């Protein structure tokens, strides 16, 4: 990255010999940086009010037994006060190693990991393959690109309904499979096929983003590198391995991280495909939603606890990911 | 099915240049077989990409709610009845209004608030900078479940459930940090010399930002605006939980309301889906190239 004007003045700890007093330092700090602080204030306020406060409140809820029967609510003119009580870490203990913890948490956890890994791998490989094809001189490649971006352009909630029509029992996919004398699975009823269908639909939705990002990355690789490699007698595979892949590294690391975060939290696809009908195909996010809003009584405390656990998993993962990138001298683009 | 496209593309390219050793080929020229295979794969991929959408359009022309099960019959009785019914007898325009109010509200607030922050984190290094960036990144990974329960409680305390303002506020919690990230990436691509020149000429940092950088950053601002608009437009979880009266549904929720427990009006649903998808896709096509640059600006430009 380039060095910015104010970046140059950012000094490291202990660079200056005589350290002024604390008040002095605060004052200097303030004078030097008040512009920056003034500029980030609006976002800081929004984050504080709309993110931090609910988050803290949410953490507090996870330490209680709040559900829709004992929280404060107003029915008609009657106001009923909250009666839930503080129960400490019981929710977490119950989720992680309670009686039916495997069925409620760990099975969903494993499926979430599998789901994320498979989806992101498929997104990336197919996206890269298509980007490579589109990056060569080819008649009509603009048209291809426009068509291939289509799944991204249509809002997810629309495409998922389209897929549901196709996957329904007598829908076009099963009709076609029947015509070919292949077995026609119950896509929307059987757990395995539900999962299969969910991955398929999510892959269909997610490939265009990868494809377009990687195409951008490919186009920014210097053509002279390929010429030089060809001069040295590198085969196409070697050029791909030693020029293309390293050239894509920073784009790749960014889109893969984004992809993992988005897929891990993918709500719309699973929720719209199955609603409440597929308890075993739910990933943790949709399961947490189900606990908090998809059943009666609504279990606010457990739902929030799932949310916090999910966030923790992602934060831990991202920290390791960044550390791993830094070790390999790579920058995260975002 | 589409997995194979990626694999075969990798195996195709190495074999292609090995042929025709006598002729001098320029880089990018390919053998006939190679380009045939490329076209083949791209055509298959395009069909896979197009088919679900075309199918939806096709189904929307069938007048019966179970036509999707025997689509062959649609050819004989194709009509636009579904469309006229949706436009005349459903809450379509209410949903359109809600979707637009909520998405535009989020966009305006998000971009306005995020712009200065994007600039500050792009140009200035202040104590707490790294932590602040980390917070912005972390807010990207909030699963819906983290904020939904407390937000629901807060908004119902404030009587903001089932109100546009409530939903806009909820969306701002993701749109604002998101726009700040996006804009930081864009500001990073504007040469720092411009700021220096402005500062030398006696502008304050605010002045530099407002007079020099903002006008230059219009494309970046547009990208941030498009992105927050599209995310707010397509959001499902909060919208379906926080909007209770069916005139205030956004499209994402309204579309689900065609399928209730006792009745599924799939023909109307398909027509509505097409009506929503067409303008949004057109809009998206106009901006998609910029969207990617905005998202991965730092990455592609190194």
Image (tube, coloured by chain):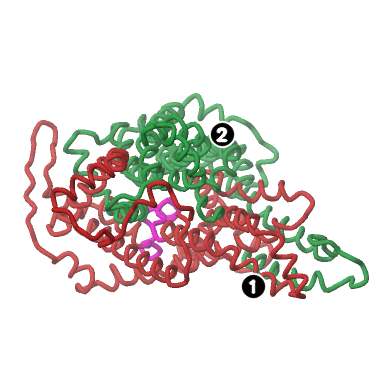
Residue at the spot of label 2: B279
- Residue A190 left/right relative to A9: right
Between A293 and B106, the one lying in front of the other is: B106
Image quadrant occupied by the C terminus of chain A: bottom left
Quick one: which residue is furthest to the top in this view? B88
Q: The green chain is which one?
A: B
Q: Is residue A167 visible?
A: no
- In this rendering, the answer to whether B64 lies above or below B142 is above
Mark 2 closeness class: few <14, some 14–19, many ≥20 residues within 10 Å: few
| Mark 1–mark 2 CB contact (< 8 Å) | no
Whether callout 1 and callout 2 share a subunit is answered no
- Residue B244 left/right relative to B29: left
Q: Magenta span has A274?
A: yes
Determine the CA span between mark 1 and mark 2. Answer: 41 Å
Tag shown at residue B210: none
Q: Which residue is drawn at 78% across and 54% down?
A: A138
Q: Is mark 1 on a helix, strand or loop?
A: helix
When asked about the image quadrant of residue B119, the answer is top left
Q: Look at chain A in the picture and name its colour.
A: red
- In this rendering, the answer to whether B166 lies above or below A237 is above
When asked about the image quadrant of residue A123, the answer is bottom right
Q: Which residue is drawn at 27% across and 54% down?
A: B146
Query: Which numbered disc, 1 or 2, marks the residue closer to the eye?
Result: 1
Residue at the spot of label 1: A241
**Residue A235, image x and y in percent?**
74, 74
Between B191 and B122, the one lying in front of the other is: B191
Quick one: which residue is furthest to the front in this view? A18
In magenta, the rendered stretch is A264-283
Between A143 and A102, the one lying in front of the other is: A143
Q: Which residue is drawn at 47% across and 32% down?
A: B212
């Amino acid at each position: 990255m380039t060095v910015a004007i104010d970046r140059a003045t950012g000094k490291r700890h202990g660079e200056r010999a005589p350290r002024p007093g604390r008040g002095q330092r605060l004052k200097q700090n303030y004078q030097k940086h008040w512009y920056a602080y003034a500029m980030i204030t609006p976002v800081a306020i929004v984050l504080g009010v709309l993110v931090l406060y609910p988050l803290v409140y949410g953490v507090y809820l996870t330490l209680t037994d709040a559900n829709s029967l004992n929280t404060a609510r107003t029915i008609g003119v009657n106001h009923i006060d909250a009666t839930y009580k503080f129960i400490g870490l019981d929710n977490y203990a119950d989720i992680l190693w309670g009686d039916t913890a495997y069925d409620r948490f760990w099975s969903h956890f494993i499926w979430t990991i599998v789901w994320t890994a498979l989806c992101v791998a498929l997104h990336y490989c197919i996206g890269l393959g298509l980007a490579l094809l589109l990056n060569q001189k080819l008649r009509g490649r603009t048209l291809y690109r426009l068509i291939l971006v289509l799944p991204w352009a249509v809002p997810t909630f629309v495409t998922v309904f389209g897929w549901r029509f196709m996957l329904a029992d007598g829908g076009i996919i099963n009709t076609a499979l029947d015509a070919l004398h292949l077995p026609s699975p119950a896509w929307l009823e059987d757990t395995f096929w539900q999962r299969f269908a969910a991955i398929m639909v999510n892959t269909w939705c997610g490939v265009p983003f990868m494809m377009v990002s990687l195409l951008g990355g490919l186009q920014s690789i210097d053509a002279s590198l390929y010429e030089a490699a060809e001069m040295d007698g590198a085969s196409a595979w070697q050029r791909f391995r030693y020029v293309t892949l390293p050239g894509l590294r920073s784009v790749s690391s960014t889109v893969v991280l984004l992809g993992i975060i988005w897929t891990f939290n993918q709500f719309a696809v699973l929720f719209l495909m199955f609603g409440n009908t597929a308890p075993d195909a739910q990933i943790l996010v949709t399961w947490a939603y189900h606990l908090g809003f998809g059943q009666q009584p609504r279990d606010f405390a457990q739902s929030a606890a799932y949310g916090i656990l999910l966030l923790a998993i992602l934060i831990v993962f991202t920290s390791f990911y960044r550390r791993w990138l830094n070790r390999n001298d790579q920058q995260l683009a975002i | 099915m589409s997995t194979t496209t990626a694999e075969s593309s990798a195996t195709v390219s190495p074999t292609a240049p090995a042929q025709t050793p006598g002729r001098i080929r320029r880089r990018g020229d390919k053998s006939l077989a190679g380009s045939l295979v490329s076209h083949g794969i791209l055509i298959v991929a395009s069909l896979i990409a197009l088919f679900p959408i075309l199918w939806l359009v096709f189904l929307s022309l069938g007048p019966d709610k179970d036509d999707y099960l025997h689509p062959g019959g649609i050819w004989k009785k194709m009509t636009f009845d579904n469309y006229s019914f949706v436009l005349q007898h459903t809450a379509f325009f209410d949903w359109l209004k809600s979707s637009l109010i909520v998405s535009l509200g989020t966009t305006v607030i998000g971009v306005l608030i995020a712009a200065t922050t994007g600039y500050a984190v792009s140009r200035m290094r202040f104590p707490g900078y790294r932590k602040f960036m980390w917070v912005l990144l972390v807010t990207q990974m909030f699963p819906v479940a983290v904020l939904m329960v407390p937000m629901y409680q807060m908004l119902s305390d404030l009587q903001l459930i089932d109100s546009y303002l409530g939903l806009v506020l909820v969306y701002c919690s993701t749109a604002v940090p998101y726009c700040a990230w996006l804009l930081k990436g864009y500001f990073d691509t504007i040469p720092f010399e411009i700021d220096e020149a402005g500062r030398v000429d006696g502008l304050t940092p605010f002045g530099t930002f407002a007079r020099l950088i903002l006008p230059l950053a219009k494309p970046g601002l547009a990208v941030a605006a498009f992105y927050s608009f599209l995310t707010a437009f397509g959001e499902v979880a909060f919208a379906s939980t926080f909007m209770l009266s069916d005139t205030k549904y956004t499209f994402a929720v309204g579309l689900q309301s065609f399928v209730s427990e006792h009745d599924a009006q799939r023909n109307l649903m398909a027509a509505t889906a097409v009506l929503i998808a067409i303008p949004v896709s057109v809009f998206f096509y106009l901006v998609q190239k910029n969207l990617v640059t905005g998202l991965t600006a730092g990455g592609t430009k190194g």
